[in-house]
Image (tube, rainbow, N blue to C red):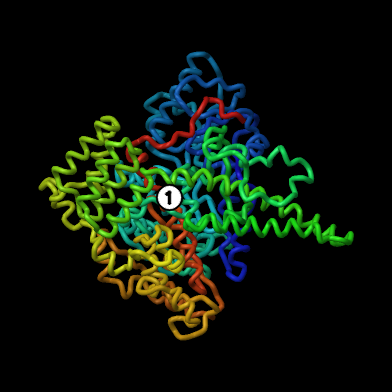
Amino acid sequence: MAASTSTPNDTQSQSNPDESCLDISIFKELAKKALVDALNSVNGAKTLVLDPSLAGPLGLITEVALLKHHGVDKMFWLEPGPLTASTTNILYLCRPLIKHVKVIADQIKRHARESLHHTYTLFLVPRTSTLVTRILEEEGVLGDVTIAAYNLQFIPVAEDVLSLENDNAFKEIWVDGDETVVYDASQALIMLQKLYGLFPRIVGKGDYASKLAHLLLKQTSTTSTTFTSDNLLGKVSEKLDSLIIIDRRVDMITPMLTQLTYEGLIDELIGVTNSQVEIPASLLNPPSSQPGASSSTAPPTSPTTATAPSLTKEKKRKHHLTASTDPLFSDLRDLNFSFVGKKLNQVARRLEEDYKLRHQAKSVAQLRDFVGKLGGLQTEHQSLRLHTGLSELLVPMTRTEEFNKSLEIQQNLLASYEVNSQIAAIEDLIAQGADMPSVVRLLCLASIINGGIKTKVLDNLKREVLQAYGYKYIPLLLSLAAPPLSILVPNPLPPSIAQSLATSKYPYSSLRKSLRLLIEDPDPLEELENDISYVYSGYAPISVRLVQCVAQKNGVLSNPEKEKKAGEDSDGRKAGGKVQAHPIVGWKGFEDVISSVPGETVDIVQRIPGSTDTNLVPSAVSALLLPREQTTTSVVFFLGGCTYTEIAALRWVAKQSKGRNFLIATTGIVSGPSLIKSVAGTGKSDSGSQEAGL
């Protein structure tokens, strides 16, 4: 459960030295303090029993040493079976799930039968639950347990990204019908407002986005508005200009596509969990053949003499992918993978030139200067080894027939080219034993884009999926077809669900034109770097286009890079290479486009709680009628998860705008495979042996 001790904003200051960015590291400190307070509330040595799904999130905010320092003797995973604790105090830390509570009750009753005397404390994340209390009461152990809450909310996972790190949020909302995550999201956003002031304007799209917006308003109005340095709910924010809520169900096309940015591709092909990736141990250790000063020789163009196949056989170690301690990763993470090799080669050449400078050092002062730089060069050298090695692992995966065939099908579906042929190609992938999530996401993509798949064809495809991968996936296929998800449906729809989905057919064809989603056959490929479509080699994520409809309207209608090259912004003023951000005026100018997208539309100007009509929070228009030098931040919240490619696209939008940054918040980081596995109930489990190895 390793955690980075660096401040997330370290990279932010490097990448945007001239911009005023929010310091979101405060969320890490708040989470750490709340954890320390929870541990200290139980006096003496204690045994910590941890929900495995919380290990990753806690690793982003603290270290094992901190737990030891505050009395944790040993740590175990929360799982069925006996619990042997060497301390009197047992502290459970888990999410309020029925399966966890029943395990806890069983362990307490087992201790009672064995005449073992312990004191039990249960901390629920992020809040207490009446259901938990009722289950413990039914099990007859409520009187033996002290119940409290550990209010773990937003966790910084990058210098501009906050996450609730709830991997199952999408399934909970659209499959299980559990809206708890909507409430948890509102509480986290209220904390954001307490720290920085009220959002002047709340804009959103989607049914659950609307529920979240109105719940946020209701809770804000009932929360104390006493103005203090720790509570700015009674004051309009001077740093935030808006909250833009994107319901994941509004854009299901984007996560079903294969991500093509460096970080996104790592997530697709290797897997990133809680910002950590498992990679060959040799990539994290300097070569043993270069001891001492010899490691300071010119950096190699590749990190190791081992080939990619041999790397895949090595023992794996977890590595925290963070730009705060790895500036090279900051440069690579948002690049289309086709440009990563070129960037790595440039860095290798630059490092080689820097190392050669030692031969030019003739005086003691010059040698001292070189030695002073040596630490930084070695750090960059190690980073270059790591990312070159990661790239070498990814390249063979991107050259497989399955990967390229899947990409071809996706591109053809997006262009609505010979749809029947694409369906046949998906059927061929099933016959060839392609990866189950890859096949199912392609079927979902075909269904969403084309308003369903012909009934007989879909029935045959479902039968082949079950025969190829097992009948255990029947619940998955049923969930994908049932409302409110309904992303794998027949065409025409059966009468039983046709009425409920009559207004839910996705208008992809019209959106492709009105939102400029597809850049066909870009020539040369470098043109893609001038639009957010570079993240999918020619396709612009609908979710980010919707954000542009609010925060960068000219970016939807045309390429802002062309205006940038012209040297003038939309108002005709010189913008120093950037286009001046326009005021936030909601969906103005795109009303017809937005209304065609299924789901409710949100556009609210917030009022100060308890104020009269004459004391409205200033609209975003007046809030932005400030000196041009002042930079504000728009918070973009993805309800149901967002992909690394969407984060990359939003960072690109921010780079084109003068006067506006984006703070990206989400329930969790998702990908096509992770969503399919989540709905199927086969997501990754973090649990291992019972003892967690404290």
x, y percent for residue 389: 57, 45
Q: Residue furthest bottom?
A: 572
Q: Quadrant of the N terminus?
A: top right
Callout 1 secondary element = loop
Where residue 154 appears, as percent x and y from the top left, is: 50, 51
Residue 438, position in %: x, y? Answer: 34, 43
Q: Please tell me which residue is depicted at 33% across the width and 47% down the height of the picture.
A: 405
Q: Is residue 484 visible?
A: no
Q: Position of residue 548 (x, y in %)?
A: 39, 68
Give left or right: position of 677 versus 223.
left
316 above or below 84? Answer: below
**Camera-nearest residue between 642 and 438:** 438
Which residue position is annotated with label 1?
667
Where's the C terminus, which quadrant?
Answer: top right
Placement of 662 over or under 323, stated as above or below:
below
Residue found at the very far left of the displayed protein: 495
- Quarter holding residue 95: top left
Q: Is residue 140 above or below residue 425?
A: above
Tell me the quarter of the picture where residue 171 sits. top left
* Left or right side of 325 for 487: left
The residue located at (53%, 48%) in the rendering is 391
For image coordinates 41% across by 27% down, the residue present is 102
Q: Is residue 29 above or below residue 142?
A: below
Residue type at numbered disc 1: Thr
